[in-house]
Image (cartoon, helix red, strand yellow):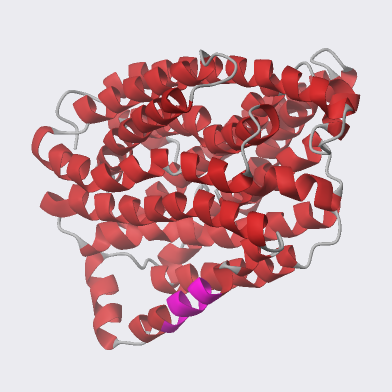
Amino acid sequence: TVVAVSLPTLGPALQLTYSEALWVQAAYVLTMSVFLIPVGRLADKHGLMRFYLIGVGIFGIFSVACALAFSGPFLIVVRCLQGAGAGFMAATSPALVTAVFPPSERGRGLGLNAMAGYLGLMAGPPIGGLIVSHTSWRWIFLVNVPLVAIVLANGWRLMGTERHDRASARQGTVVTGRPLDWTGTALLAAVLVTLLVPLISVPFWGWLSPLTLGLLGGFLVLLGAFVAFERRVSDPLLNLDLVIKNRVFAAGTMAALLNYAAVYGISTFTAVFLQISEGYTAQDAGLLLLTQPFFMVALSAVFGRLSDRIGSQIPATAGMLLVAAGTAQLGLLPSPAPIWRVIVALAVVGVGMAAFSSPNTSSVMGAVKRSELSLASGFLGTMRTAGQGVSVALLGAIAASGLGPTGGRVLFLGEAASEAAALSFSDGYRTAMLVAAGLAVAGALVSLVRGPRSK
């Protein structure tokens, strides 16, 4: 979220085209998606906390590299590597929490974990807006460094205690003798790349261009190859029986994909919309975007405890419907957009996310054996981050549908030529938010499938 609100400033600083700006966001979630499941498998074997701290270190190193970026392509490459570190953290964090809390309190624990993540989401927009309004954009990446140092210092101390090692063994979170499926990992990476590249590039290539059709066709072929290979291999990267035979797990992970496909792009494209089309400063846009994560932080633990009592189906489904209502309101904003309507729409989305996230995670993690916690955590995280990548790519393509190559080059430059591009983006943004609402409705329908008392 720090980067999202800063894109209109990053654009002219590094001469980014619209497509490159999308890749600054998508590259991060792409590599994060690729690393989640294999890291979950390796963490099962070698220890959750160890791999969590490795991820923190990678994230910190490449945060510094991002701050030193001198061009758009260089920034995209190091954002990929920064996303790898985030993948390590995301693969292990829910499993660590699940192992610590007893089943009767799992929803509360995951709610607290979600709340911590939402605090980061809440702090990101105003911090990003303040940074780019008052100092160099490079500080949006350097601000991570002291946080990384604190986590490494405390995590290393925890990992070194005998008590932690015994707890990990007792909870069954360290498993040995399971080789990593490198072929499956490579196929999964290829599946994600062939899906996201054409979606991000379609505003400039066109839906019917040979490149777009070829890559989307390649995506379907590789997806089929991945499923076929994983069904045959003795120790697969992804145990498809979790999806095929476990209705709660399948519904929860698919709902997570649709949820993040609907929601993740909101901060990125609303930040651009407010600054480029509505004339807000980065600082003011960041403060407005604070609305959504504020409600996520305030209510995530509440809905986690509620799911412990009544199950996950009702709060998760209601949450998706609220997300649909909020994104539809963003899609129906008039021009100019009244500030109160933006705030109300973001608040509704925030409440919906709080109602969905921790109950859904609790439902998914509670549907597997304890020995499969890291694998389930990695798969759930992969579905979330795949949804994030689809959100940036699909909603970004729709928002840019009227820009064309010239508009994509000048959108961030603030020149006379970019005024028409800003108007075109404004129309595309509204359409993208209505599509996001449709994705959220689909997620609500999937969430119903998990069963009335799933926890």
Q: Residue 363 is drawn in which quadrant? A: top left
Taking depth in this image into account, of 132 and 81 the one nearest to the observer is 132
Counting from the top left corner in percent of width and height, residue 344 is at 38, 27
**Which one is nearer the viewer's eye here, 281 or 429?**
281
The answer to whether residue 19 is magenta is no
**Viewer-proximal residue among 140 and 417:** 417
Picture layout, residue 308 above or below residue 136: above
| Residue 452, percent from left and from top | 16, 23
Q: Is residue 4 left or right of 235 when viewed as pictured? A: right
Query: What residue sits 74% from the left and 60% below the top?
Result: 78
Whether 224 is drawn above or below 127: the answer is above
Q: Quadrant of the C terminus?
A: top left
Q: Which residues are magenta?
A: 146-153
Please identify the quarter of the rendering in which residue 343 is found. top left
Q: State yes or no: residue 147 in magenta.
A: yes
Q: Is residue 346 visible?
A: yes
- Asked whether residue 233 appears in the rendered view, the answer is no
Report the residue at 50% width, 63% height from top. 42
Image coordinates for residue 151, horizontal then vertical, percent: 44, 75
Lateral position of residue 439 relative to residue 255, left or right: right
